[in-house]
Image (cartoon, coloured by chain):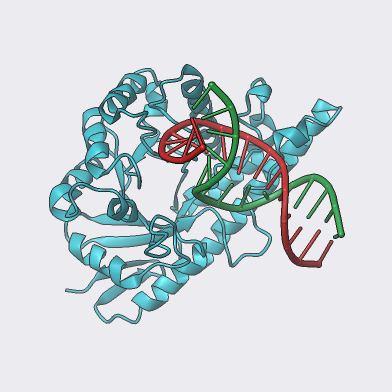
Chain colours: A cyan, B red, C green
Amino acid sequence: MTVFRLGYVAMSKHVKNSSPSQTVTYKNFSHYADQEAAKNKLITIANSNIENSIRLLKHNKASGIFFFRLSSRLVPLATHEELNDWNYMKGIKAKLEELGDFAINNEMRVDFHPDHFVVLNSDREEILKNSVTVLQYHYKLLTGMGFDTKHRCVLHVGGTYGDKERSLERFIENWARLSVRLQQMIMLENDDKSYNAGDVLFLCEKLGIPMVFDLHHHQANHTQPNWLDSYWERIVDTWRSSDLPVKMHISSPKSDKQFRHHADYIDMKTFVEFASNVDGSVDQVDCMIEAKQKDEALFKLVEELKSLSHLEWINDSTFRFLR
DNA sequence: CGCTGTCAAGACGAA
DNA sequence: TTCGTCTTGACAGCG
């Protein structure tokens, strides 16, 4: 019987004033005459973001949630090229350790999803360089928290540049230029426009990368609609080298017209259909709920699932099917 | 205080 | 080749 564990993304609709993504724009930062004072301000905001992340993890624990995506914007301007000699780790080390200790002591799975400006298959050297900088930033955060850094960052493949085959090849070429520790930090996800599940599996199998399957993206972008027969077993296989359970992204389309947009909540029927389809195929599947209403969407989904009689609950966010 | 505009990034399609 | 759009949360500034 497969265990299904639910998590959510970065911020809470329930906990007030708990943004982990407060920031300063570079334009604003550059207006300060005293650069040291300005950097201290950035550190203050970063520590507030990390403190709010700790608050969110405490809220999660109280709610029985042990799977969470941290904001990638914890440290404002950390990866900005004008601040490339800034040692931001020094000022946030203590808070980061506190965050990591809490997550580790409570056996939580946390990871990151750097935004889509990390493009490993870019044909521009500058973009690749910036992408590596962003990955190194995530590596430092994970290490600062005391985490095993393996398979903690979900990425998309990137752009197609008018030639998808060539752009897939370029991903492989650029991948070889990454350090092993950055390679091992990465998971790859199918996207809703360019690289479908088959494309991502090709890369994941060739390069030994765990694949995060996004069901909603698959519905928006596929050549083989039947993911269960076409891809599922291969997706599970990409996780064999990982210590972490298979990871999924779950969201629902906002509307037929805006199909690719995320809805406020999760359609329970679609989720149950997915879960029952994969039940028994693997020990555990971690499902990241990506909905506009964040944790409230998770709570609503759980409430609806709890009205079903054929589920057994391990805690308030984890269940399996009864035989 | 609340609304509108601005910011940041890269891809991509239109003009 | 340049520009606008997409996307997202949060900040800045106006009234």
Q: Position of residue A14 (x, y in %)?
A: 59, 67
Numbered disc total:
0
**In the figure, A179 relative to B4: above or below?**
above
- Residue A301 visible: yes
Viewport quadrant of the N terminus of chain A: bottom left
In the rendered view, does A195 fall on the left or right side of A281? right
**In the figure, A191 relative to A33: above or below?**
below
In the rendered view, does A129 fall on the left or right side of A305? right
Tell me the residue at 38%/26% (across/down): A121
In the rendered view, does A257 fall on the left or right side of A234? right
Residue A266: name its quadrant.
Answer: bottom left
Residue A150: name its quadrant.
Answer: top left
- Residue A66 visible: no
Tell me the residue at 66%/30% (across/down): A88
Tell me the residue at 65%/50% (across/down): A51
Viewport quadrant of the C terminus of chain A: bottom left
Q: Position of residue A44 (x, y in %)?
A: 74, 41
Tell me the residue at 53%/67% (across/down): A62
Q: Position of residue A298 (x, y in %)?
A: 44, 67
**In the figure, A140 relative to A6: above or below?**
above
